[in-house]
């Protein structure tokens, strides 16, 4: 009965959206404005199967990572039944994220620039309503240690939980990264121009801190490390956060892959390697396997 009620709610929402689109379209046609059209498959509203559905892989000549929905059958984190979201909660988080994006777009650009200049932390504070839903698995350190990160387009700093947890750490599926076991790990010095606040240091090592809108926080050392995307794609000296005090709703993942605007953004740090080309694809269904490259 609950599934049928959720489905009817989505149908009603779709009808309201279509009615709004038709009304807006008529007004734009009268004013001579160019129209954009979008096609929504009705089948995407039905519950998907519980098995992982592979998609066409990108060309072998390109670097790529698997993108999976963390609550779908393709995710190794989905075995945690207590962490799964029902359809109502997924829709609520989608709505909250859209409202957050609209709120950001409505702000004055000059105010945003002013705020960015006054930021003292090396990582810009981000706002996440709910949690990102898609994860990628990458290797970090030497020897390589695999971690699953939720990718977030609203914040720039990539971070993962690290041993030892001096404050508190949430439960994650994989073993935590231990920087003392990696020969390629380096803390960022307080004298580095990448350290946004030289006063926030520990034994001359730069610290970072991020507070999210839902109350989640991560605090730790700003560092550089080797990231392994594929066997042939190994990136040296990627800036990231080694979090030793982390609290929040990160649902079994090891941390965040930051894709948002900012100097620590993963796409920005790899512009030279990939010639300023970066893209990602998210499946319409949570059990579909996709890629970003």
Image (cartoon, rainbow, N blue to C red):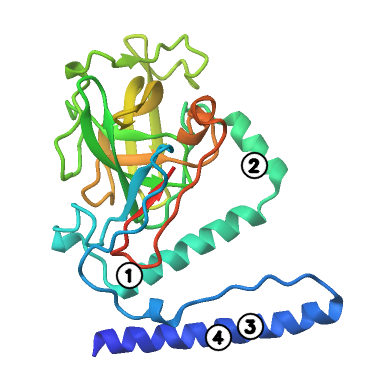
C-beta proximity under 8 Å, tags 4 and 3: yes
Q: Cα distance, mark 4 to mark 3?
A: 6 Å
For mark 3, does the 10 Å Cα neighbourhood hold few (<14), some (14 to 19), or many (20 or more) residues?
few
Quadrant (top left/top right/bottom left/bottom right) for the C terminus: top left
For mark 1, does the 10 Å Cα neighbourhood hold few (<14), some (14 to 19), or many (20 or more) residues?
few
Q: Which residue is mark 2?
A: 112
Q: Nearer the viewer, mark 3 or mark 1?
A: 3
Q: Which mark is residue 23?
A: none
Among the 4 quarters of the image, the one containing residue 209: top left
Q: Cα distance, mark 3 to mark 1?
A: 24 Å
Q: Which comes before the other along the chain, label 2 or label 4? A: 4
Is residue 220 among the parts visible in the rendering? no
Is residue 113 among the parts visible in the rendering? yes
Q: Which comes before the other along the chain, label 1 or label 2? A: 1
Name the foreground residue: 17 vs 279: 279
| Location of residue 136 in the rendering, given as x and y in whole percent from the top left corner | 32, 45
| Location of residue 163 in the rendering, given as x and y in whole percent from the top left corner | 18, 27
For mark 2, does the 10 Å Cα neighbourhood hold few (<14), some (14 to 19), or many (20 or more) residues?
few
Quadrant (top left/top right/bottom left/bottom right) for the N terminus: bottom left
Residue name at image x 50 percent, y 83 percent:
14
Q: Nearer the viewer, mark 1 or mark 4?
A: 4
Q: Which residue is mark 1?
A: 89
Q: Which residue is mark 4?
A: 16
Q: Cα distance, mark 1 to mark 4?
A: 20 Å
Among the 4 quarters of the image, the one containing residue 246: top left
Q: Cα distance, mark 2 to mark 3?
A: 31 Å
Q: Which comes before the other along the chain, label 3 or label 1? A: 3
Q: Which comes before the other along the chain, label 1 or label 4? A: 4
Residue name at image x 41 percent, y 24 percent:
239
For the image, the number of numbered tags is 4
- Disc 4 is placed on an element classified as helix
Residue name at image x 19 percent, y 58 percent:
78
């Amino acid at each position: 009965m609950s599934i049928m009620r959720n489905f009817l709610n989505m149908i009603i929402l779709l009808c309201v959206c279509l009615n709004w689109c038709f009304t807006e379209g008529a007004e734009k046609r009268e004013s001579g404005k160019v129209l954009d059209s979008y096609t929504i498959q009705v089948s995407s509203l039905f519950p998907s199967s519980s098995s992982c559905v592979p998609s066409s892989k990108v060309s072998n000549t390109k670097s790529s990572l698997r993108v999976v929905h963390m609550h779908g059958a393709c995710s190794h984190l989905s075995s945690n039944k207590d962490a799964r979201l029902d359809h109502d909660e997924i829709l609520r988080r989608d709505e909250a994220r859209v409202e957050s994006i609209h709120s950001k777009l409505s702000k004055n650009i000059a105010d945003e620039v002013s705020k960015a200049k006054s930021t003292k932390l090396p990582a810009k504070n981000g706002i996440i309503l709910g949690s990102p839903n898609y994860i990628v698995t990458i290797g970090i350190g030497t020897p390589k240690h695999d971690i699953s990160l939720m990718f977030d387009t609203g914040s720039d700093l990539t971070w993962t939980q690290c041993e030892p947890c001096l404050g508190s750490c949430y439960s994650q599926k994989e073993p935590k990264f231990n920087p003392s076991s990696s020969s390629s790990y380096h803390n960022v010095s307080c004298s580095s121009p990448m350290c946004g606040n030289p006063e926030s240091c520990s034994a001359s090592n730069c610290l970072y801190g991020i507070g999210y809108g839902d109350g989640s926080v991560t605090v730790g050392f700003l560092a550089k490390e080797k990231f392994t995307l594929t066997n042939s794609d190994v990136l040296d000296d990627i800036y990231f956060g080694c979090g030793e005090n982390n609290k929040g709703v990160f649902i079994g993942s090891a941390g965040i892959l930051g894709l948002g605007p900012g100097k620590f953004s993963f796409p920005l740090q790899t512009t030279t390697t990939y010639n300023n080309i970066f893209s990602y694809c998210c499946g319409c269904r949570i059990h579909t396997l996709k890629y970003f490259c």
